[in-house]
Amino acid sequence: MCETELMQKAINVATENVTSVHGGPFGAIVVQNGKIIAIGRNEVTATNDPTAHAEIQAIRAACQYLNSFQLDDCELYTSCEPCPMCIGAIYWARPKAVYYASTKEDAAKVGFDDQFIYEELALPMEKRKIRMEQIMLEQNNLPFALWNDSMTKTHY
């Protein structure tokens, strides 16, 4: 399949999702060597899971399919420019490329505006709308120390 056919597939998933019980107007696919290995659709309202965005769902399915926590040699096609949460997941999954159709500005026009998250991330913690405060305990860094000394850890 060529890039335009793959993007059309992601758009079709999003379009079908609008008329189903799954959720919002977003769809994504993961492709490896020209073959679709995973499909994700926005299922936020269907599952009551705010992390169930199309890209996240596609990444989860692809990682299960590949039995890996990374999407080496994979590409992600998504019906819309990824939100900040999905961008983070994409970077952790490490696909070789991401292609999108609509922009975040297009999404904002119909009520999916993530601009406030970008703005919040740029603020110092004490100025964010949601309180974020460190609680210091003697054992704060114990998990990191154990990880650092572990002989069985898998780097990622």
Image (spheres, rainbow, N blue to C red):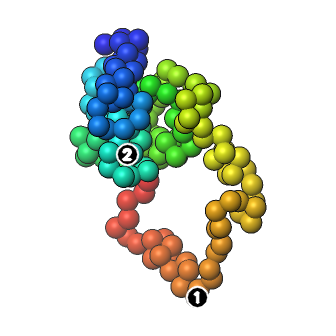
State the residue lying farthest toward the bottom.
138
Q: Secondary structure at mark 1?
A: loop
From the viewer's perspective, is 104 left or right of 75?
right
Mark 1 in CB contact with mark 2 (< 8 angstroms): no
Q: CA distance from mark 1 to mark 2?
A: 40 Å
The residue closer to the viewer here, 20 or 1, is 20
Question: From the viewer's perspective, is the residue at label 1 or at label 2 nearer?
Answer: 2
Residue 31 quadrant: top left
Q: Nearer the viewer, residue 138 or 154?
A: 138
Q: Quadrant of the N terminus?
A: top left
Q: At 32% across and 45% down in the image, what residue appears?
A: 46
Question: What number is the disc on residue 138?
Answer: 1
- Identified at 37% across, 15% down, the residue is 8
Indicate whether 107 appears above or below 139.
above
Image-quadrant location for residue 152:
bottom left
Residue type marked 1: Glu
Find residue 2 and report its horizontal and vertical position in percent: 36, 11
Against 46, is 41 above or below? above
Q: Earlier in the sequence, mark 1 or mark 2?
A: 2
Tell me which amino acid carries mark 2: Thr
Locate residue 17: give its quadrant: top left
Q: Residue sitting at 47 percent across and 76 percent down?
A: 143
Q: Which mark is residue 45?
A: 2
Image location of residue 63, percent across then percent down: 31, 43
Any part of residue 33 in sight: no
